[in-house]
Image (cartoon, helix red, strand yellow):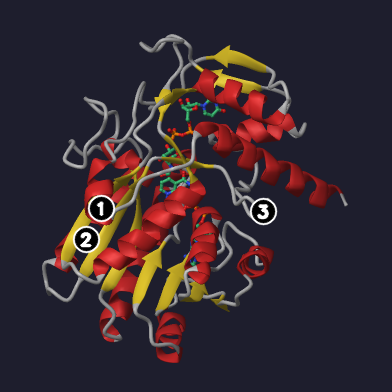
Amino acid sequence: MSILVTGGAGYIGSHTCVELLQAGYDVIVVDNLANSREETLREIEAISGKSLTYYSTNLLDTNGLDQVFENHTIDAVIHFAGLKAVGESVEKPLHYYETNLLSTIQLCKAMERHGVHKLVFSSSATVYGIPEQVPVHEDAPIQALNPYGRTKIMIEEILRDLAATDEKWSISLLRYFNPIGAHKSGRIGEEPSGIPNNLMPYITQVAVGIREELSVFGDDYPTEDGTCIRDYIHVVDLALGHLKALEKLEETSGAQAYNLGTGNGYSVLEVVAAFEEASGKTIPKKVVERRPGDAPVTYADASKAERKLGWKAERGLGEMCEDSWRWQSHRAKQLAE
Ligand code: NAD
Ligand code: WQD
């Protein structure tokens, strides 16, 4: 089976490509490298011992996209490509709406033109905003706190409308919680450009000396140690969830949302402590003001994915920290050479 992976050079896409290739799928990547490097594709091939086909096409380029569908018989699409920085989405909403919404619409139109109706979409736990109840179930109220989150909600709605037009469509809306970690090989991982917005890349950059200290955004939340609680999930577990979702598309019709999380919540200070334990490094930190828009506590009810997809996250926080650290130290050495 041939799978088109948009955004396959990115953080979650690259790990998913490795798992797809190792499972025997043919992989075609479309990525304009807006937030990734072409070398990652070579690393995917080295890890898996298989080759993939790569197009540097922008998803907004209709002709380019048609060319990809004409060159290959594609069975299903996993759509990771998009912009994901919350703060940037507030500053550049049009850029976010254009890239995330239009690219998805162009992709689905190209799929229709070429008779491809199976799609796995990267949604996010951000669609729950500040949850009223935890663990968060798929039926919980939807609420966007920023333009990025709104793009995910809008795309989910567009895809539900599309799925209702023809029973040939089978679409999975995968709502990721907080992906961290990296492939065991240390050859691929998360590499944000500029100052990291997210907790784990900030911690790993402090650990290798790129940043001085971690700012902990608030310690007066109603949690045991006062810091926010999140559901961190190993990126390889997340990648494997995509393979299960693909299999499910074979036997279903319509659009379905699934939480991909572990069901466990950890505080910011617990993550820092787990990282220090895994890396042997001390992470200097100071408590600063709360970050606007942060939910105090969120973690998944991941039972639907287990029941319907036969998927469950298996890797714990210690392993996530070890793998993040292996990747960051390997990359820092590479950059220093
Ligand atoms: P990423 O930025 O590492 O990967 C996205 C990839 O898409 C990049 O390689 C980028 O070059 C490519 N891309 C962007 N715009 C494109 C375009 N117009 N045409 C072709 N390629 C384009 O991000 P990621 O962390 O791997 O996230 C993948 C998806 O998962 C995104 O849709 C993101 O919103 C979603 N998601 C991510 C997280 C997270 O914390 N990382 C959480 C929930 C959901
Ligand atoms: C985790 C915790 C911070 C950085 C974001 C997006 C969400 C999704 C996943 C894409 C929070 C605290 C962080 C720092 C800190 N992405 N923190 N110091 O906010 O749960 O989710 O990524 O869909 O849409 O919003 O993740 O890693 O930014 O923060 O104290 O320097 O770490 O306050 O409690 P978040 P995060």
Determine the secondary structure under disc 2: helix
The residue where tag 3 is placed is 185
Confirm or deny contact between disc 3 and disc 2 (CB under 8 A).
no
Question: Can the viewer see residue 195?
Answer: no
The total number of labels drawn is 3
Q: Quadrant of residue 139?
A: top left
Determine the secondary structure under disc 1: helix
- Disc 1 under 8 Å from ligand 1? The reply is no
Q: Position of residue 128 (x, y in %)?
A: 27, 37
- Disc 3 under 8 Å from ligand 1? The reply is no
Q: Position of residue 203 (x, y in %)?
A: 63, 30
Determine the secondary structure under disc 3: loop
As shown in the figure, which amino acid type bears the numbered disc 3?
Answer: Ser
Query: Is 263 drawn above or below residue 271 in the view shown?
Result: below
Q: Residue at x 25, y 53 (%)?
A: 154
The residue where tag 1 is placed is 154
As shown in the figure, which amino acid type bears the numbered disc 1?
Answer: Met
Question: Can the viewer see residue 108?
Answer: yes
Q: Nearer the viewer, mark 3 or mark 2?
A: 3
The residue where tag 2 is placed is 158
Q: Residue furthest bottom?
A: 70
The quadrant in which the N terminus is found is bottom left
Q: Residue at x 36, y 55 (%)?
A: 97
- Rounded to the nearest angstrom, the CA distance separating label 1 from label 3 is 37 Å
- Rounded to the nearest angstrom, the CA distance separating label 3 from label 2 is 38 Å
Q: Position of residue 266 (x, y in %)?
A: 44, 25
